[in-house]
Every structure is written in C-alpha cells, then in structure tokens.
Image (cartoon, rainbow, N blue to C red):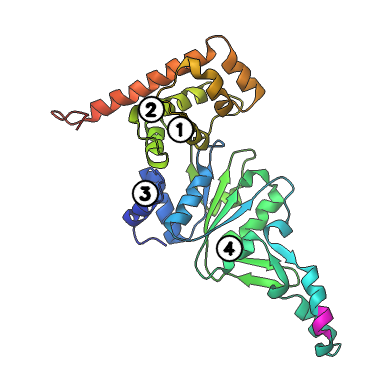
Amino acid sequence: MFSSVDDLGLRLEAAKYVIDPVTLQVVYLAARMQKPIIVEGPPGCGKTALAHAIAAAGNTIIERLQCYEGINEEKAIGKFDSSLQKLFLDTQADHLQRDWDAIRGALHTLELFEQGPLLRSLLYKKPCVLLIDEVDKVDEGFEALLLEILSEWQISIPKLGTIKHTTIPFVILTSNEVRRLGDPLRRRSFYLRVEFPTVAREAEILQVRSTTTNAPLRRLIAGLAHALRGWQMEKPVSIAEILELAQALEILGLEDITPEMRNILLPLLAKTESDRKRLLLRDGFASLVHDAHRYAQEVVGDMAEKEPSGVTANR
C-alpha cells in the first residue's frame, strides 16, 4: 500500500492528517506486515480519523463495522437474502428438475448472500481499510469471532463454507476502554495508545484542517480545548468539536475569545446539562478563557525557545 515511511508520511500530509513519528512507523509496519492495529484512548481524540486518513492516503475505500452491545454475526458478516432465494426458486427450480441437493446448493451461494462489512472487506480487488469501531462495546463471544479473520484472513460461514480473502485489508480496531480487550485479540495486533493532543499539536491540527488563517487564534482555540479537558468535564470536547469551534468563530468574524462570549460558545462546548452548569458558574467561563490565553502564550514561548540563535520568530 505504501512504498516507504516517507511515502506514507507525504500521503498522510496530503490527506491533512497530523501524525507523530512513532504512529507513522507503526502504521507503515502494520501495512507491510499485514497486522491489525488496536488504537485505544478516550472518545474524541482522533482514533477513527486515523483510519479515514489511512484510507485517503492509500487511495482506497473504508469499510466500517460500527460495534455496539448485542451486535451479532449477521450484522458483521452477513446473511442469506431470503427474498433472492425465493426469487431463485420461483424462476429456476424447474431447471434443476427437483434435484434437491442441487437446489439446496444453489440456494446457499455467495451470490445469494447479503454481505456484511467483515466479509466485504476480504473480497475487494484492491485492499481496503477495515475500521472495526468501538470494539470494546462487544462481548467476548463476538471478539472471538474476529480471531479467524485477523489470523487467517478468512471467514467460515454455515451452509456457505470458508470464504478466503481476495485481498487483505488494513485493519484498525478502535477502543474507548469500556471493556478490556482480550489477550488473543491483542496478540494478533499492534497497539497504539492515543491521547488528546498537546496545545501545540492541536494548533498544528487546526492549521492543517481548518480554514482559520489567524495563527494566534488557532493557538487560543487549542488552549481553550486543553483548558476544557483539564476540567474533567462529563463529556470532554473532541478534536472534531474544536475544528467546528474554529469554523464557527470564522463564520461569526471573531478573532478572539473573551469571557463575554460565554453564551455564544456554550452550545458548542458544553453538551450535557452538568457541563453547562459548571461553565455557567460565576467566573467559571472567565477562568477558562484566562487559562486558554495562558496556554496559548506558553506555546509561543516554546516556539521562541526552539528558534535558532540570531533568527527571529517573524521570519
């Protein structure tokens, strides 16, 4: 899928994904060694975005299995299409001359099987990216179902047999740590721990993925995100929501964040009643904005320290 680490880096850069060197190496190795990657971390820190960026970098499609409590094999792998089977019997049974074994065999073919995302991911002519999202929400039984796919790149289906891969997908499994994933799944995968970005890294993400050209404002927005997450909110603000905040400020023509903007920004930042009440406390939002400015200034200071001697930051 990628010819080198540098090639992958350039492709991810073109896909507007900011990646650190360690993650870049792991993604490249996983692609070359055909290993799944478990990406674990808090909700909203960019785990799913990595899968979409890899798909864009590889110029391929993404096949997504959204996991949830109670998901079954039919949703993940697929099932026989009863309406197609009935149509086949209505139109083709006479040609089989009541050969029941032949009829039974004809009814249970891949052509009459409604494919789920796991099966589809193995049958593409060009490798796809298979995103198994929030795998920590399924039980141990469903997790065991994944082992054959991730080890042998095949799926065994009753009445259909074993379906082997046409191509091997690039697999990303995301986890919000609702439940600890089992060791058999971990043994078969590489592992990446993802946290919310630093202020400097989030400012870089805003530079790449937002249309905000005001660098001080980007740092201030990133500082606000860091301050919000430090408050241990019931629903921490995600990277995607911070990108939306940048877009909203641009639409409103605002180039600063002040305590007086509380009522405007509250619907964008507080998504539960308890978080809303916390930000409505006296001086609550004002202290948040103060911290945001402080974090933004710290980034400026760090940038100045990294400048070579004799070279100014305004070059």
The answer to whether one can see residue 252 in this image is yes
Q: Nearer the viewer, residue 34 or 9?
A: 9
The answer to whether one can see residue 232 in this image is no
Q: Which residues are magenta?
A: 89-93
- Compared to residue 75, the image places residue 314 above or below, namely above
Q: Earlier in the sequence, mark 4 or mark 2?
A: 4
Would you name the residue on which mark 3 appears? 13
Closer mark to the observer between disc 1 and disc 4? 1
Q: Quadrant of the C terminus?
A: top left
* Label 4, label 2: how far apart the Cα atoms are: 42 Å
Q: Disc 2 vs disc 1: Cβ atoms closer than 8 Å?
A: yes
Amino acid type, mark 1: Ala
Would you name the residue on which mark 2 appears? 217
User: In the image, which disc is placed on residue 121?
Assistant: 4
Quick one: label 4, few (<14), some, or many (20+) residues within 10 Å? Answer: many
SS for callout 4: helix
Amino acid type, mark 4: Ser
Quick one: label 2, few (<14), some, or many (20+) residues within 10 Å? Answer: many
Q: Residue at x 84, y 80 (%)?
A: 90
Give the dominant element type of the magenta stretch: helix, strand or loop: helix
